Amino acid sequence: MTAQFIVLLTEEKDAARGELRFLDAPADVAHYIEVLLEGGHAKENIRVFHGNEIELEVSYRPVVSLAAAEEEDSPLEAEALPEGEAQNGDLPEGELPEGDEVQGVRNGVRFSELFRPS
């Protein structure tokens, strides 16, 4: 690839906005700048760059996200349980599991039972 001239004409009110023109020959750049100056554009708003285009390579990486245990249960598994049976480890009211399987329960006592209103 051959080097090109890049003429940047920025707006007076907003230097972040502008117009680019790509030109190949220095004579073309000089003529274009003369036209801009004669058209009333300020010299401070005209910038000239010289450079080569570089290759750009884009690659994609896989994105992995872990689902919570509750999200892993498919709707088919939930439908397979007979009516009245607990889902996701829930127990019918008043029943405690064997051991410390339920969060908030230790030695058969629920955490919330320790803080009863007086």
Image (tube, rainbow, N blue to C red):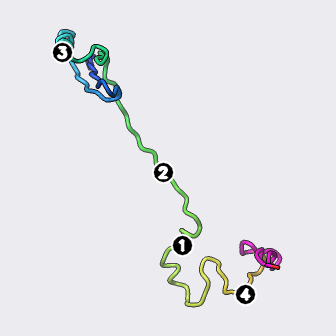
Question: Which residue has dot 4 on it?
Answer: 94
SS under mark 2: loop
Q: Tell me how far mark 2 sits from mark 4, CA to CA.
A: 43 Å
Q: Tell me how far mark 1 sits from mark 4, CA to CA.
A: 25 Å
Question: In the image, what residue type sits under mark 4?
Answer: Gly
Image quarter of the N terminus: top left
Q: Is 86 left or right of 35, judged from the image as shown?
A: right
* Mark closest to the chain's N terminus, 3 or 2: 3
Q: Tell me how far mark 1 sits from mark 3, CA to CA.
A: 67 Å
* Mark closest to the chain's N terminus, 1 or 2: 2
Question: Which residue has dot 1 on it?
Answer: 73
How many numbered badges does the structure rendering display?
4
Mark 1 or 3, closer to the camera? 3
Tell me the residue at 62%/84% (across/down): 86
Image quarter of the C terminus: bottom right
Question: In the image, what residue type sits under mark 1?
Answer: Asp
SS under mark 3: helix
Quadrant in the rendering for residue 54: top left
Discs 2, 4 touching: Cβ within 8 Å: no
Q: Is 32 left or right of 69, judged from the image as shown?
A: left
Of residue 62 and residue 19, the one placed in the foreground of this image is 19
